[in-house]
Image (cartoon, helix red, strand yellow):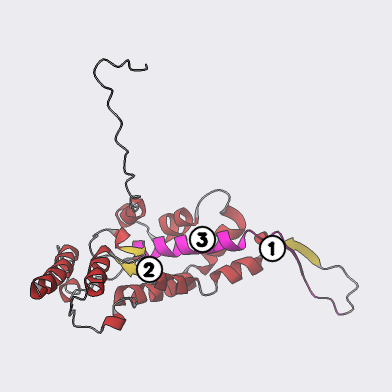
Amino acid sequence: MLPRLVILALGVLASSLQLSQADSSPEEEQGVRYANRCEACKILAAELEGRLGETGKSHDVIETGYSVDDVRPKKRTEYRRSELRLLESLENVCERVLAYNLHKERTDSTRFAKGMSQTFQTLHGLVDKGVKVDLGIPYELWDKPPVEVTQMKTQCENMLEEYEETISDWYFKLQDQKSLRQHLCEDHVLKKKAERECLKEELAPPQLQLQPKNKPKKGDNEEL
């Protein structure tokens, strides 16, 4: 019974790898498919807007400017509209990418998502039951960010540097008019329509289990 369960576990992993390698490129043949620019931009925009959402809750007013004699009044600015908030939100925003996992049971951009993949949930469940599962890597490395995610963090950092002015323009002038995803990804990073396909892909919410309705008994009156 034990060998059969081990084979089952490896089969689950192998099937997910096969899904991700359909129409594979040379790098995919090695089991690796790095994030494209659409996927990287999509996640960068989501994480930066998420970070701005966290810092935007403050109603503090800050004073800016410098005066030798402290006589001239300093400029007072709402923190949520300040350059300081933008700089603090940008700082280490790409570190947040490392919270993502690779869900190889999916083939579109939703393969990058937070939370443990179905594949590894299954494998961890088998280990918890005492099954010996050998994936060729130490067990303590199972939950480490895969190379696709660490490489996407580098993509995020490069994109931030390349489009720093674009993000700044959106923050100070356009954030009330359109999302960062639209301004950064659609209007600047991804010039061709075909490159933007991943922006439409969203992870479907878990299906709600419908409670079965009690069928009326024969002869009962139904309310209209």
Residue 129, image quadrant: bottom left
Task: Report, in whole angstroms, how far the alpha carbon at label 3 lies from the one at label 1.
Answer: 17 Å
Is 86 on the left or on the right of 71, as rendered?
left
Whether 50 is among the magenta residues is yes
> Residue 167's x, y, as percent?
53, 63
> Residue 137's x, y, as percent?
23, 83
Q: Nearer the viewer, residue 90 or 15?
A: 15
Report the residue at 67% width, 61% height from top. Answer: 58
Identify the mark nearer the N-term, 1 or 2: 1
Is 16 on the left or on the right of 36, as rendered?
left
Residue 217 vertical position relative to residue 39 in the rendered view, above or below: above
Crowd around label 3: few <14 · some 14–19 · many ≥20 (10 Å): some
Residue beneath disc 1: 79
Residue type at mark 1: give it: Tyr
Q: Give the range drawn in magenta.
A: 39-68
Whether 189 is among the magenta residues is no
Residue 78, image quadrant: bottom right
> Residue 162's x, y, as percent?
46, 71
> Residue 90's x, y, as percent?
54, 70
Residue type at mark 3: give it: Gly
Identify the mark nearer the N-term, 3 or 1: 3
Residue beneath disc 3: 50
The quadrant the N terminus occupies is bottom left
Report the residue at 88% width, 75% height from top. Answer: 70
Secondary element type, mark 3: helix
Identify the mark nearer the N-term, 2 or 3: 3
Q: Which of 18 and 78 is in front in this view?
A: 18
Crowd around label 1: few <14 · some 14–19 · many ≥20 (10 Å): some
Residue beneath disc 2: 100
